[in-house]
Image (cartoon, helix red, strand yellow):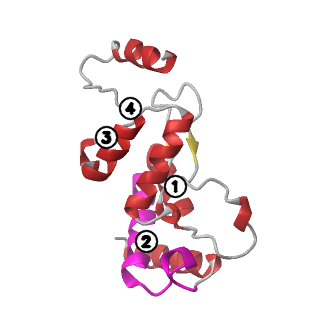
Amino acid sequence: VFWDEVFREVAKDYPDIRTASLLVDAACLNFVRRPESFDVVVASNLFGDILTDLSAAIVGGLGLAPAANLNPSRQYPSMFEPVHGSAPDIAGKGIANPLASILTAGMMLDFLSEKSAASCVNRAVARVLADRKVRTPDMGGTATTRQVADEVIRAIQMLHAQKV
């Protein structure tokens, strides 16, 4: 397969990085059985979509899964988007879980070397999840998108005020 050939060719430029090729079904099995064995995954769009959706299910659902397509050399732009994409089927209904989008923004801040801001965003989301006060329907709650976002904003403001 052309993709595999390109992967092997590029891998030659990075001899210090251990690489492996897996069929998508084997990768899915190992994502569930041994997720810690993966650091970076390189995949075609189709297989990448399958693997990211599976990964989202492992961590609690699409509403919690940030994602990015990174260009470490920064020669070309990187793209940041939650695993769930734009979710046009629920747009404007107030039921979308905003946490994946917020966590994706945190990933972008980290990539842009805004480490303190990224950490604050991640800690705020963790605090909201730990408090269990607001949950969107996908997480078994009744809160709206706005209510969850407002709770994250409050947590960010509290962390910022504490300079934690």
Say which label, 4 or 1, has the lower sequence index.
4
Distance from disc 3 to disc 2, alpha carbons, whole Å, reads 24 Å
Residue type pointed to by label 2: Ala
Residue kind at label 3, given as amino acid type? Asp
Q: Are marks 4 and 1 in contact (CB under 8 Å)?
A: no
Label 2: which residue?
A: 124
Question: Which residue has dot 3 on it?
Answer: 39
Badge number at residue 41: none
Mark toward the start of the polypeptide (4 vs 2): 4
Quadrant, the C terminus: bottom left
Closest to the camera, between mark 3 and mark 4, is 4
Q: Amino acid at mark 4?
A: Leu
Residue beneath label 1, please?
Answer: 104
Q: Are marks 4 and 2 in contact (CB under 8 Å)?
A: no
| Mark 1 or mark 3, earlier in chain | 3
For this orientation, the residue located farthest to the right is 92
Give the mark, 3 or 4, whose residue is nearer the N terminus: 4
Closer to the camera, 81 or 90? 90
> Comparing marks 4 and 1, which lies closer to the viewer?
4
* Residue depicted at x 41% and y 36%: 24
Between residues 25 and 158, which one lies in front from this camera angle?
25
Locate residue 153, reporting x and y percent.
Answer: 54, 75
Q: Is residue 86 visible?
A: yes
Q: Nearer the viewer, mark 2 or mark 1?
A: 1
In x, y percent, where is residue 125?
A: 44, 70
Residue linked to disc 4: 23
Query: Whole-Å distance between the Cαs marked 3 and 4?
Result: 17 Å
Query: Which callout, 3 or 2, points at the residue further toward the start of the chain?
Result: 3
Give the camera-side residue of 96 and 128: 96
The Cα–Cα distance between marks 2 and 1, rounded to whole angstroms, is 13 Å
